[in-house]
Image (cartoon, rainbow, N blue to C red):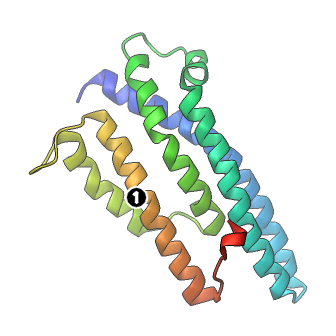
Amino acid sequence: MSDASGAAFALAHHVFGTLFIVLRIVVQGVGVVITQALGDGQSARADVVACVVLGASGWIGLTVALVAATAAGPLMRPINAPPDVLPLALPLLVALAPAMLLDARNASMTAVMVAIQLFRLALIAPLMFGAGPLPALGLPGCAVAVVLARPLAIALHLWLWLQRLGLQPLWADW
């Protein structure tokens, strides 16, 4: 679209990725606990930890999403974005904030799957440039595609948990 749009995209995703590190740290620690439980033959304990982390990751994801949505300016200004990039990057980070909540769930369940990435990529062009009845949203269209791909990821992860692991998180786990 433009150099400024490309820079805004990169800047917003850089901040998004930095905030996502908080979620990855928690997930890595939980992976160790689950592996230890499985190594000790305590599969029931591993199942409980997996479901508990699903709930905890939701709260962590919500917190990180709220920080991104309400403090986009203070998060981006120290990066010294050029004056023509910052006004484009700020609303993009705010639009990406809901994806952080959903990414927290995905990160606690498994690594990102190819199907979700393909779905996201299939949505980007029509949402950015318009297609049929869809209006051209420009750069925010990319954020919409990212957010829309996350519920699919959660649904696929839950299906895999149920089918492959026999785990079905309950509302109490959330």
Q: Position of residue 123 (x, y in %)?
A: 27, 54
Counting the numbered discs, the total is 1
Q: Image height check: is 28 above or below 64?
A: below
Furthest residue toward left: 132
Residue at point 67% right, 65% down?
Answer: 174
Asked if 72 appears above or below 172 in the picture, the reply is above
Quick one: 138 or 51, which is closer to the camera?
51
Q: Which residue is mark 1?
A: 149
Q: Nearer the viewer, residue 30 or 49?
A: 49
Q: Quadrant of the N terminus?
A: top left
* Relative to 67, 144 lies left or right: left
Rendered residue at 66%/71% (across/down): 171
Helix, strand or loop at mark 1: helix
Task: Place residue 3 in its image quadrant.
Answer: top left
Query: In the rendered view, does 34 fall on the left or right side of 88?
Result: right
Q: Residue at x 44, y 18 (%)?
A: 86
Q: Is residue 119 left or right of residue 21?
A: left
Pointer 1: residues within 10 angstroms few (<14), some, or many (20+)? many
Q: Amino acid at mark 1?
A: Ala
